[in-house]
Image (cartoon, grey):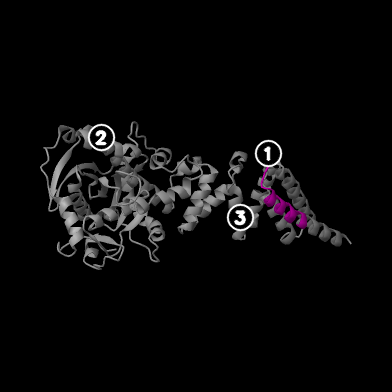
Amino acid sequence: MSGLREKLGRLRSSGSSGVPTPPTDTTASAEPVEALEKRTIQTEVPELSPEFQQIGVELKQNEAGQFLLRTIEYPLPYRHGKHELTDLLECASHLSAIAMRQNRQNQPETIEPRRLLFLDTETTGLGVGTGNVPFMIGFGYYTDRAFIVEQTLIRNPGEERAMLTYLLEHMKDKTHLVTYNGRTFDWPVLVNRFILNGWRQSGQEPGHLDFLHPSRALWRNTLPSCRLSMVEEARLGIQRGHDVPGSLAPALYFQYLSDGNASHLHGVYAHNEKDILTLASLSVHFGLLLSGVPDPDTIQTTEGEELFRTASWLELHGVTEEAERLYALLSGMDDDVAYGSGWPLALAARHKRAGRHDRALPLWRKWAEIAENSAVPKLDAHVELAIYYEHRDKQLLMALTYAEKALELAHRRARLHSDAAKRKEEKESLQHRVLRLRDKVSRERK
């Protein structure tokens, strides 16, 4: 993918939906320009307060005006949580599988660490409409010797265009944005602000690596939530200590606008900075998973549900060898507690689709045993065993035994559920199976 600046020279059509193109002719469209002029008139502002200077914030100036900038440099190697950020230099290419799916590409996309922009915004609201303003845009990137975090901030609406101009300058040689829910939130919010500030939409959108979706695929059933703060603590070993929640950022910004005390924003800066570092660490985590060399300690201590989700996710992204290793590991598990989560049935179904009934049978048998001793039994394993013994192993008595047990469990479960119609249909189907099998067994004995 070429640099985003190169794309700005292409497709100058306002009807396309790509990256923004800075306006070069301020007379091209009267109404937007009038609005733009009102927004970009520079008013006299006070000197930068000591509260800003205390955390390294500087006043920046470009052709579009003023804004505030804070820059933090993390010399490499640098560890954030359990991952060295330099590890991304070795495994970044494996993230191509995620980029292909998220960007709907048929060909692998080149992922090079120095051409990634790790992006996180702090906004005045939660929606993606035009009234939501990103008052802080934080982004990180790799250089030869460091990981750099830059945080821009506006003190009034007249500084927004200068901030966006600075962001575009940093996007010009980047191929992908790395975010957490950025495809549906951060980027659409920014696109709206570009348009309102006079830019046209043009060319192809930047590539996306949005790690919210892989996180949900792996951890939606094993973590209380897939918020970034939860993921980083539970799976990346990152302890923030005192941290300003992102939900409080708008209120703290408005408090700063009200009284001019920049100390209200110190926690917002720290929160945004850590989010960007976590995006880099999460990139390493998924890069290592997709490279087939996940952390062995993590694999050994991970519960079955997450191992199954990980294996399914790896298989989906073409890492079949590592996926098969995890599937084999799961097939050998003997943990009654783990069976309560439901992954063994999903794993057995996967083995069945692959024609590996030898691997599916132990899982069905184990699940059937647990179901018979459960207060709210599930019938799936009994039904699958009845089907297997009738149609593949040709042991009709065994098939009938499992079908009759499934019908018994169905009667027990019907007493516990209010969905009478569904339970009636379930029982009728099992009754039909039992009668058919009894007839087969009777005819076989004659």
SS of the residue at dot 2? helix
Q: Of the residues under marks 1 and 3, which one precedes in the sequence?
A: 3
Q: In the rendered image, which quarter is residue 99 located in?
A: bottom left
Q: From this viewpoint, is residue 142 visible?
A: yes
Residue 25: percent from left, percent from top: 15, 64
Instruction: Determine whether, in the image, residue 91 is placed left or right of residue 64.
Output: right
Q: Nearer the viewer, mark 1 or mark 3?
A: 1
In the picture of the structure, the residue carrying the numbered disc 1 is 375
Q: Which segment did they paint magenta?
A: 416-432
Could you say which is closer to the camera, residue 209 or residue 263? 263
Q: Of the residues under marks 2 and 3, which one precedes in the sequence?
A: 2
Q: Amino acid at mark 2?
A: Gln
Residue 374 belongs to magenta span:
no
In the picture of the structure, the residue carrying the numbered disc 3 is 349
Instruction: Determine whether, in the image, residue 432 is placed left or right of residue 94.
Output: right
Q: Amino acid at mark 1?
A: Ala
Q: Residues within 10 Å of mark 1 (few under 14, many from 20)?
A: few
Q: Amino acid at mark 3?
A: Ala
Give above or below for 78 relative to 404: above
In the picture of the structure, the residue carrying the numbered disc 2 is 255
Q: From this viewpoint, is residue 91 visible?
A: no
Q: Nearer the viewer, mark 1 or mark 2?
A: 2
| Residue occupying the point 69% across, 41% down | 416
| Residue occupying the point 48% across, 41% down | 223
User: Distance of mark 2 from mark 3, alpha carbons?
Assistant: 55 Å
User: Distance of mark 1 from mark 2, alpha carbons?
Assistant: 54 Å
